[in-house]
C-alpha cells in the first residue's frame, strides 16, 4: 500500500496539508459524497472560511446556504457547531488525539481517525466503505459489514496492519486503493499488486465480497406546499422541527398520506393561515418533485396561491412564515427540491 499510493494517488487539495481544520473540512464534506461532487464545495468553504474562527463566526443560515445541494444537512449544522466548540473550548486548536477528537460533535470514529493520522501522525486505522471492501476481499472476510459487531473485527485487523512511522500514508493509501483500484464493480484485478495474496481473487469471490445486508426501503412522505404570494414577495419559513431539512427554508406545508391534495383543501389550508385568496388566483399544482433521502422519500407538489392581502401578523408570529423578495429568497438556505422549484417557477 505504501508503495502503491505515491504512484497512483489523485492530486487532491487536502492531501497537501497537515492543517487539521482543512482535513476535517474535507472529511465532513466527503462523507456520503463523491470527490468530484465534493471538490467545489471544499474550495468554496476553505476560501470563504479559511480558518475555524471564520467558520465559527458565520451564521447558520450562511453556512447552510453554502452547503446547499450536498444533502444530509445535519452534517453542515454539526460542522458549524463543532467549529464553535473548537473555538470556545479549545482556543481554536483542534485536539491532537483520536480520543479527544471523538468528543467533538459530529466527529465519529472514521473522521477522528482520519484527522488524528493525517494531521498528527497517530497510529490509528481509518475504516470507511473503501477500507471495508479492500480488507473483506484481501482477507476473505464474509461477515456482514452492515452489522455493527463486524466493525470491531475490521478495526482490529486494520489496526494490526497500520505502520507506526507512516500511518497517514497507509490510511490514505488503502482508502485510495479502494476508491480507484479495488472498486465495488469491475475492480482492476488484472493489474493489482495484491492479486497473489488476495483471497477473493484466488477463490473467485470478488463479486461476492464484501457481504452487506440491504437497508430496508424507506417510506414515502407526501408534501403539499402552499406557495403563498403577495405582490412581489413569497412566504417562506425556517424549518425548526426535529425532522429532515432542519434549519432550511420552505413554504407553508401540509403533509398527507396521499400524493394529491384537492383544491378545496388547498383553500382551507390558506384560510387556516388567515390568508385571503385573490379571485381566480389559485393555480394548478406543479408536477411531483421527488427527493430520495437515506430512510425516506419525499414527493412534493407546489400549489401557487396569490393573496389579495398580506398574511396577518398573528399568522407570521405563529407559523414562522415571512415574506421574501426574489433576491432575498435566493440567499436563503433551502432543500434542493425547493431550490429547483423556485428556479423553474416562481419569480
Ligand atoms: S485482486 Fe482484485 S479484489 Fe483483490 S485486492 Fe486486487 S483489485 Fe481488489
Image (cartoon, helix red, strand yellow):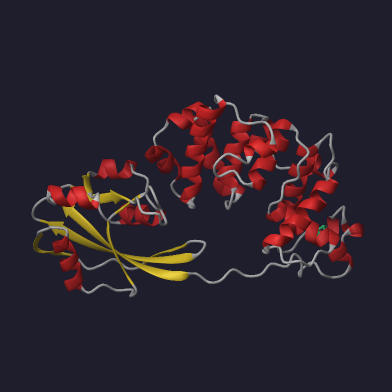
Q: Residue furthest right?
A: 196
Q: Is residue 51 left or right of residue 237?
A: right
Residue 197, by quadrant, is bottom right
For residue 146, above or below residue 107 = below
Residue 165, by quadrant, is top right
For residue 237, above or below residue 220 = above
x and y percentages locating residue 242 in the rendered image:
40, 54
Q: Nearer the viewer, residue 219 or 7?
A: 219
x and y percentages locating residue 110 in the rendered image:
66, 47
x and y percentages locating residue 5 in the rendered image:
79, 43
Count of numbered labels shown in the rendering: 0
Ligand 1's image quarter is bottom right
Q: Is residue 103 left or right of residue 278?
A: right
* Image point (57%, 27%), residue name: 90
Residue 124, by quadrant, is top right
Q: Residue furthest top?
A: 91
Can residue 98 be seen by looking at this rendering?
A: yes
* Image point (84%, 65%), residue name: 200
* Image point (74%, 53%), residue name: 131
Amino acid at each position: 500500500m505504501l508503495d502503491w499510493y505515491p504512484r497512483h494517488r489523485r492530486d487532491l487539495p487536502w492531501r497537501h496539508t497537515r492543517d487539521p481544520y482543512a482535513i476535517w473540512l474535507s472529511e465532513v464534506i466527503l462523507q456520503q459524497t463523491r470527490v468530484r461532487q465534493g471538490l467545489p464545495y471544499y474550495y468554496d468553504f476553505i476560501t470563504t472560511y479559511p480558518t475555524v474562527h471564520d467558520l465559527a463566526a458565520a451564521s447558520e443560515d450562511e453556512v447552510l446556504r453554502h452547503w446547499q445541494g450536498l444533502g444530509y444537512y445535519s452534517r453542515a449544522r454539526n460542522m458549524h457547531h463543532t467549529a464553535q466548540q473548537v473555538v470556545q473550548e479549545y482556543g481554536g486548536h483542534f485536539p491532537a488525539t483520536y480520543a479527544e477528537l471523538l468528543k467533538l460533535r459530529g466527529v465519529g470514529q472514521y473522521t477522528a481517525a482520519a484527522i488524528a493520522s493525517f494531521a498528527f501522525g497517530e497510529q490509528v486505522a481509518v475504516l470507511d466503505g473503501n477500507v471495508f471492501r479492500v480488507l473483506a476481499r484481501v482477507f476473505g472476510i464474509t461477515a456482514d459489514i452492515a452489522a455493527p459487531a463486524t466493525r470491531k473485527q475490521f478495526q482490529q485487523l486494520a489496526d494490526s496492519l497500520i505502520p507506526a512511522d507512516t500511518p497517514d500514508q497507509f490510511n490514505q493509501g488503502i482508502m485510495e486503493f479502494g476508491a480507484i483500484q479495488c472498486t465495488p464493480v469491475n475492480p482492476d484485478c488484472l493489474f493489482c499488486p495484491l492479486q497473489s495474496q488476495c483471497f477473493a481473487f484466488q477463490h473467485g469471490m470478488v463479486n461476492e465480497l464484501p457481504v452487506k445486508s440491504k437497508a430496508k426501503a424507506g417510506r414515502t412522505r407526501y408534501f403539499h406546499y402552499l406557495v403563498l404570494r403577495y405582490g412581489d414577495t413569497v412566504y417562506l419559513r425556517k424549518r425548526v422541527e426535529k425532522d429532515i431539512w432542519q434549519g432550511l427554508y420552505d413554504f407553508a406545508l401540509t403533509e398527507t398520506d396521499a400524493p394529491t391534495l384537492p383544491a378545496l383543501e388547498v383553500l382551507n389550508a390558506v384560510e387556516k393561515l388567515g390568508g385571503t385568496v385573490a379571485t381566480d388566483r389559485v393555480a394548478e399544482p406543479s408536477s411531483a418533485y421527488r427527493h430520495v433521502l437515506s430512510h425516506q422519500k419525499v414527493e412534493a407538489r407546489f400549489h401557487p396561491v396569490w393573496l389579495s392581502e398580506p398574511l396577518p401578523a398573528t399568522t407570521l408570529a405563529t407559523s414562522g412564515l415571512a415574506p421574501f423578495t426574489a433576491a432575498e429568497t435566493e440567499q436563503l438556505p433551502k432543500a434542493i427540491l425547493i431550490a429547483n422549484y423556485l428556479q423553474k417557477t416562481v419569480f
